[in-house]
Amino acid sequence: MSKFCPIINEKVLYTECLECPEKICKGEIRMPAKKNILIVIDLQKQFADRTGEYERCLEFIEENKNKYDKIIGTVFSQNSENKYNPNYSKHFQWDDCLNCSENDLEYVTENVKVIKKTGYGSIELIDFLTKNYSKTDNIEIIGCDLDACVAAICFQLWDEGFENFKVLTNFCYSTSKFPKQDLVKVLRRNFGNCII
């Protein structure tokens, strides 16, 4: 049953319990409703592919945006203000990722929190999730690159103890030359049934 809790100022699920630590629920303990979060990793114009995967991801967001309490998008960006790393230019020729912003994300709306990142993973993303959400909330992940940035974020979520994250591999892609099914196997080896 769902009720409004004045302590945390939001709607929560109540379950029967013999002891209530807050003594406000008349024998029921408050259990916050799980949030549904979509993390969209580096789905930016600079990484649009030629196979239509980028467009499929945009369509997924448009068709499912109301399913999520929050959408968080990352944008890979390099500039002198945020610890420019020459490896990305030297090894990958990602010079077109200089000074990227939310303007490079085609799906941004008022419900989308945009986080800039300067590498594969994002400490800022993990900090934002830790401060604003429960480690048992439902997190779904889509985006690019499956074997790089998506994998790095998964390792960070795993190491921070987030329990309910899923990578929707049908809505992830890679600029790598390796077959997608091989990349999925590597992720399944590390994260088991978190990879669907």
Image: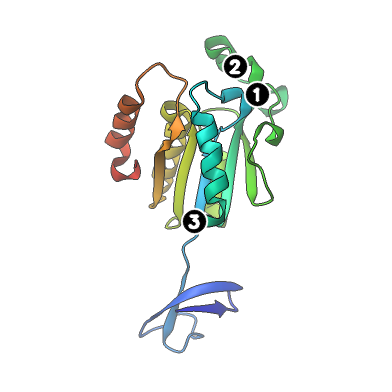
Front residue of 171/56: it is: 56
Residue 8 seen by the camera: no
- Residue 161 in the image: state x and y as whole percent: 40, 49
The quadrant where residue 114 appears: top right
Q: Amino acid at mark 1?
A: Gln
Secondary structure at numbered mark 2: loop
At horizontal 56% and vertical 33% (from top left) the residue drawn is: 43
Left/right of residue 82 with respect to residue 36 in the rendered view: right
At horizontal 36% and vertical 82% (from top left) the residue drawn is: 17
Q: Mark 1 touching mark 2, by CB under 8 A?
A: yes
Left/right of residue 40 with respect to residue 20 in the rendered view: right
Q: Amino acid at mark 3?
A: Asn
Secondary structure at numbered mark 1: loop
Q: Which comes sooner in the sequence, label 3 or label 2?
A: 3
Secondary structure at numbered mark 3: strand
At horizontal 56% and vertical 78% (from top left) the residue drawn is: 5
- Residue 12 in the image: state x and y as whole percent: 51, 73
Can you name the residue that lies furthest to the bottom here? 26
At horizontal 51% and vertical 43% (from top left) the residue drawn is: 60
Question: Label 3: which residue?
Answer: 36
Inter-mark Cα distance, 3 to 2 = 32 Å
User: Where the N terminus falls, by quadrant?
Assistant: bottom left
Q: Kindly identify which numbered label has been placed on residue 78.
A: 1
Q: Amino acid at mark 2?
A: Trp
Question: Label 2: which residue?
Answer: 94
Viewer-nearest of labels 1 and 2? 2
Label 2: few (<14), some (14–19) or many (≥20) C-alpha neighbours in 10 Å: some
- Residue 151 in the image: state x and y as whole percent: 42, 33
